[in-house]
Image: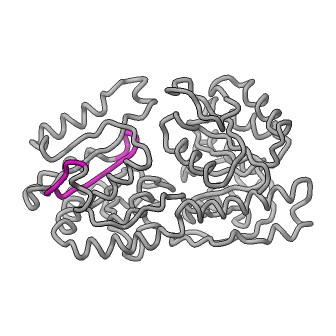
Amino acid sequence: MPVTACVSTYPPDRCGIASFASDLVACTGVAEVAALDPGYTIGPYPAEVRRRIRREVRADYTEVAHTLADRGADIVSIQHEYGIWGGVDGAYVLDFVHALRIPAVTTLHTVLRRPTASQHRILSELIDASAATVVMSRAAASILTRTYGVDPWRVDVIAHGVPDLALVPSDAIKPLLDLKGRQVILSFGLLGPGKGYEAAIAAMPAVVQAVPMALYVVLGATHPDPLRHEGEAYRRKLEAVAATLGMTEHVRFVDRFLGPAELGTWLSAADIFVTPYSNLDLIVSGPLSYAMAAGRVVVSTPFAYARGRLAHGRGVLVEAGSLAALAGAFIELLLDPVRRAAIGLRAYEASRASVWPEVAKQYRHVFAREASLRGRRPAESPARRMPVPGRTLPDSAGPARSPRSRRSRGSAGTG
């Protein structure tokens, strides 16, 4: 394992990428972290955070990039999503990657199917400047090829890491959370517009008519960005929808950012997990992956990541925007525990290849491969033809590959 640094948002920052980076660091043995500091982080950073990059202070990016090699790092793991980096569309990531004197392995948490010209340029330039690019689904790899002109041989596909949870009956866990006797539908994640929770709440009157003890739990604190700008307006809006529909006894909001252990308990207590997202271009979903790891049956709109992960009977896809389809799926599954258990078991078994120890092995392989190639042309090294070991993704879309050749300049277009 080469000496590796990670650049990302990081706990106590409350975002999914921060949680992902924390797990990646813990499981791979990353030596130090440079935290992308949004300016409103609550509490001190842990000991592994040796450097901070203030999001909108452009000079921090080049300064930290220069110091990582000086501190002995062989390679840098970059976590990328437009909103966590400073500048318009996160353009300051380019200042950072161009200032590096060591190779970068960039993990893409967002790959837009229809980017703006600015977003297209930034992502294309970031990929060009990175020694390796990692995505979490074959659907994302396919988008890189079709929309950004990236050679498919240059993309490593490594699944989103998940905790290694035990498969337990939900009824055994419900009493721990005051849910005994309830039929529990669960969503979790940072609360904010665009996740489709309104649709799940609107489906509940029909569900309750068929299953009187049904309960929809919306688990998670409000995302820091909307919280700063509009407070709890979105949560209040959802609560008002539930009240208007007479569902206050059947919709529960848990306004908390949960640690791994408590989150695992809530997932294990659920009968159904729902991702009713309206954005059908999403190429990764940590909550969906976590629910599968707990062996829960997932009901989802057919966004890109869900189509791959829930294929072959590992979950249930419903038409986006159809309350009747969503309610029908809930009712059918809640009334059929045998089918629910069978789907959950298939999801659980499929997730075993994605538990963090397995995912960490694949990242360590990529880090070691790219560190060994430092200063050498790709064509000179047989390591470029070494596959990522143990990679098994059930996604149905996009290429599955492991060796890489250099991208042809000018092939990406203008977006």
Residue at 63% x, 48% y is: 25
**Taking the image as drawn, is residue 192 in sight?**
no
Q: Is residue 181 magenta?
A: yes
| Quarter of the image that includes the N terminus | bottom right
Q: Position of residue 354 (x, y in %)?
A: 53, 65
User: Residue 240 appears in which quarter of the rendering?
Assistant: top left
Q: Is residue 39 above or below residue 368?
A: above
Number of residue marks? 0
Residue at 49% x, 58% y is: 162
Q: Is residue 216 above or below residue 62?
A: below
**In this view of the protein, which residue sits in the foreground, 353 or 412?**
353
User: Residue 59 appears in which quarter of the rendering?
Assistant: top right
Left or right of residue 353: residue 226: left
User: Residue 366 appears in which quarter of the rendering?
Assistant: bottom right
Range covered by the magenta-colored residues: 177-195
**Taking the image as drawn, is residue 136 in sight?**
yes
Q: Position of residue 151 (x, y in %)?
A: 72, 63
What's the colour scheme?
one colour
Q: Position of residue 126 (x, y in %)?
A: 72, 45
* Main SS class of the magenta portion in the image: loop
